[in-house]
Amino acid sequence: MKKCFWVFLLFIFVFTACGATSNEYSSIEAIDKYLSSATGGGIVNDPLLIKVNMDLQNMLENDSRWKQLLRIINKHGKYIALDLSNCKMFNTEFNPDPNFEDGKKYIVLIVLPKITKSITETKVDNRGRASAFKYFENIENVVIPEGVEYIDDFMFEKFTNLKSISIPASVIDIGRFAFSNCTSLEKVIIAEGSELEIIDDLAFYQCTSLKSIMLPSGLLYIGVTAFSGSGLENIIIPENVKVIEQQAFGYCSNLTNVTILATEPPEMGEDVFSVFNMHTSTSRGMTGSFVTIPALRVIYVPADSVNSYKSAKNWNAYSDIILAK
C-alpha cells in the first residue's frame, strides 16, 4: 500500500512539473462526459486524474464553475486527483466555501491554482472551527503554490487521511494547530529557498507518522509543543533558530538524536525534550516530574559551544547528553 502511494505521488509531481495535457479539461460538460465513461476511481487509492484549465469564477457563488465542478464530481461518486494549477478564479484567494459539501469527500489530491496568493482563513466561533478544507475528509495530498505566505491556524487540524503536504518557499508562518493530529502525515515537503520563519504552537502536534522533516535555514521560532507527540526519529535545528518553546519536542518517543547548528544556544523553554513521568496518585491528581525522552541518546552542538549549551538555562537539564558534533 505504501509503495503504491509514493508511486502515485511521484506521478502527480511529474505530471504537474512537466505540464502534461492528458485528461485536461476546459469545460464542465467535458468533465461530466469523461467521468461518465471513465473506469477507475472506485476507491481512494485508485483516483482518476483530472487536470482542469478554466475560470473557477467567484468560488462562493452558488452557480460558479467551482461549485458546478464539485456537483459533477459528487454526481459520479468517483475519487479524483484534481489539478487546478492552470485555473483562474475571481481573485487570488482560494476559497472553496467551507459551507459547501458536495463532491469534496471524493477529492484525494488537490493542486491549487498557481495564481493563489492566500487561502481563506479558518473561522473560529461559538459553533466551532471551520477550515477552508472542511468536508475534504479523504484528502491525502495538498500542493500549495508559490505565493501563499501563511498556512492559517487549524487549517488541516485532524485531517487523519492527509499523507503529504507541499509547502512553497513563500510561506512565512505555519499557524497554530495547522497540522495537529494529522496522524497519517508522513511527508512535509518544504521548498528549497524557503522563507519560513515561524512554526507556531502545536503546528505538528501528534503527527505520529511524521518521522523526519527538513527545517529551512531561515527558521527563527519553534512554538510550544510544536512537534510534541510526533513520530520524529531525528531532527536538525537550523543555526538561525532563536527560540524553542516549552515541550516543542516533548513526548517524541522515537526521537533518538538532535543536532543544533546554532553556535549560541537558542532561548529554550522548559522540558523541550521531555515527557511527564507520573509517580503517584493523590487526592489532587497524579504527581511526578519531567524526564528526558527515553529514546533520546544525544544532542549534538557545535564543538566550540558545548560548554555554553551545558550551562545555558533549560539546556543544562540535558547536559549529560550534549556532545560536540
Image: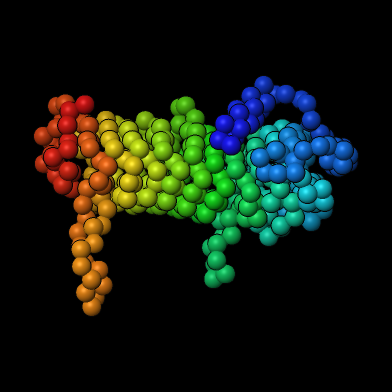
- Residue 171 appears in view: no
Name the residue nearer the viewer: 52 or 135: 135
Instruction: Identify which residue is drawn at 66% across, 40% down.
Output: 45
- Residue 76 appears in view: yes
Residue 256 x, y percent position in the rendering: 29, 38
Residue 205 x, y percent position in the rendering: 41, 51
Where's the N terminus, which quadrant?
A: top right
Residue 210 x, y percent position in the rendering: 44, 41
Question: In the figure, is residue 296 to the left or right of 80?
Answer: left
Name the residue nearer the viewer: 293 or 73: 293
Where's the C terminus, which quadrant?
A: top left
- Residue 51 lies, with reference to residue 208, above or below; the image says above
Residue 97 x, y percent position in the rendering: 68, 55
Instruction: Identify which residue is drawn at 33% across, 35% down.
Output: 234
Instruction: Identify which residue is drawn at 23% across, 58% down.
Output: 277
In the picture as drawn, the residue positioned furthest to the front comes out as 1
